[in-house]
Amino acid sequence: MFFLNLSLPEFLAIFTAVSGIVVALYLLSRARRKQVVPTLRFWVHAKQPVPSSRRRRIQQPWSLILQLISLALLLLAISQLKLGSRETAQRDHVMLLDASSLMGAQYGSRQGTLLDEAKLKARAYVRALPGSDRVMVVRADGLPSPATGMESNRQRIERAIEETRVGASALNLDQAFLFAGQIRQNKIIKKSYPRTKII
Amino acid sequence: MAQPLLDQNFLQKLERLTLHWQKSFPGLVGGRIPSRFSGLGQEFLDHRHFHHGDDLRAVNWRAYLRLEKLFLKMFHIEPRIPVRLLLDCSESMAPKLEYARQLAGALCYIGLVRLDSICIQPFRSTLEESFVCGGGRHRFLPAARFLENLESGGKTDFLSVCRQFASTFNQRGLVVVVSDFMDDKDPERPLQYLADFGHELTLVQIWTPEDREPPWDGELELTDAESGERVELSVDTNARREYTEAFDEYSRRLNLMANRTGGRYVGLPTSTQIEAAVFDSLMRVGVIQ
């Protein structure tokens, strides 16, 4: 069990601070209100001496407890409590596949290019991912361009990898990383664990 | 321009009304309600034996011719009775003073129209400076100004007020007490004393809705508006119910005391319109007709 949006210390710190405010407001609302009345003679019947120790105690605990429980539930909802471990949680991946002209070069003694080798490794990476993870394939050359959206369909991802061809421009790695970073920040990845793996 | 105490339409409606009292008071001629006391009236009341010093003009000479005894004819008198409006101006009346002013103004106007002699007597712990008027509706404006200038403040002390009143006003008459009767000491005994002295009491108790049914709940620190005394209370629905019962019981006791002494009692929440208070509540108990 873990929090998606907050760490446990953050959660506890916020909960403690807000609970403190709620308890203070509760005690303030239970403080004596001052009223001016025309006479006190009729209050004699309703008069109940209130010992000072009783005043300091919380007199309606259920009201306060329910408020604190509601507050805890609200904070849990905000921090997105998830079952399981952080490692097994769904992730989104942005896969930058180098499609620059350099990738057309021969790779080793085998009959293939660097791009073919990169495709092999990319496919191997995709297959190694848990089924719930999503992948966005981005073809990186002079100008990075997404080949898929955030996709959990492995066939589509592999097709996008397969259809990647060597481009004519040189690789602009900074631009590619910037693009991947923007995808993370721009909430394109919604309702997901916001960790992006860049290959 | 300041709002007048009572609007013109309401004053016109008041002109049809008269102040009424039940007791017979001795006094000088010029009133409109007959008294059981004999005097210089028009309507025959009774005969009595002639005593030395009686007015010979009232001797029944026909009876003397038949019986050879002197009998004196007595006549009903319609005495001019003073109407005194005792207006509570203590601190507890602060939220009710405007209402009390208007009510006193209405009663004053009714009396003036019927040529009654009206005395507006504000009081706190003692009697304050009074305002006496009479002789017609055109005397209402100074009375209204006097009422408008009254301010609330100080403590109520009915015992002191009633003592002072009894010693100041010798002639018995109608006494209309407009107050919330929120004296820490019991006001019943002093008012009883005033009634025993021969005055006819009309008690008009005024309260705000909060006075009778306090809307507050929880931990309260209540301060007496007049004495400044404080008490800390835990108020819940039961406590509020008991408070209202105690208030109603107090009003009932005032009512009983007024009726026992031949007077009247009217309870008026300030939520009641002045017009409704005059034409419904006050008329129902017979203070005005």
Image: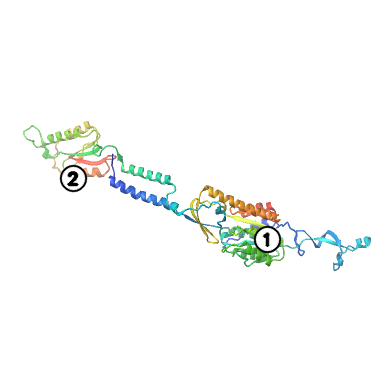
Residue farthest along the top direction in this orientation: A155
In terms of image quadrants, where is residue B153? bottom right
Foreground tag (1 vs 2): 1
Q: Which mark is residue B193?
A: 1
In this rendering, the answer to whether A197 lies above or below A34 is above
Tell me the SS state at disc 2: helix
Residue that carries the numbered disc 2 in the rendered image: A175
Q: Are marks 1 and 2 in contact (CB under 8 Å)?
A: no
Q: Counting other residues with Cα less than 10 Å from the Cα at mark 1, is it few (<14), some (14-19), or many (20 or more)? A: some
Residue farthest along the left direction in this orientation: A109
Q: Is residue B199 visible to us here?
A: no
In this rendering, the answer to whether B260 lies above or below A150 is below
In three-dimensional space, the C-alpha distance between marks 1 and 2, rounded to whole angstroms, equals 103 Å
Residue farthest along the bottom direction in this orientation: B53
Q: Is residue A81 visible to us here?
A: yes
Q: Nearer the viewer, residue A75 or B190?
A: B190
The amino acid pointed to by label 2 is: Gln
Where is the N terminus of chain B found, in terms of image quarters?
A: bottom right
The amino acid pointed to by label 1 is: Tyr
Where is the C terminus of chain B found, in terms of image quarters?
A: bottom right
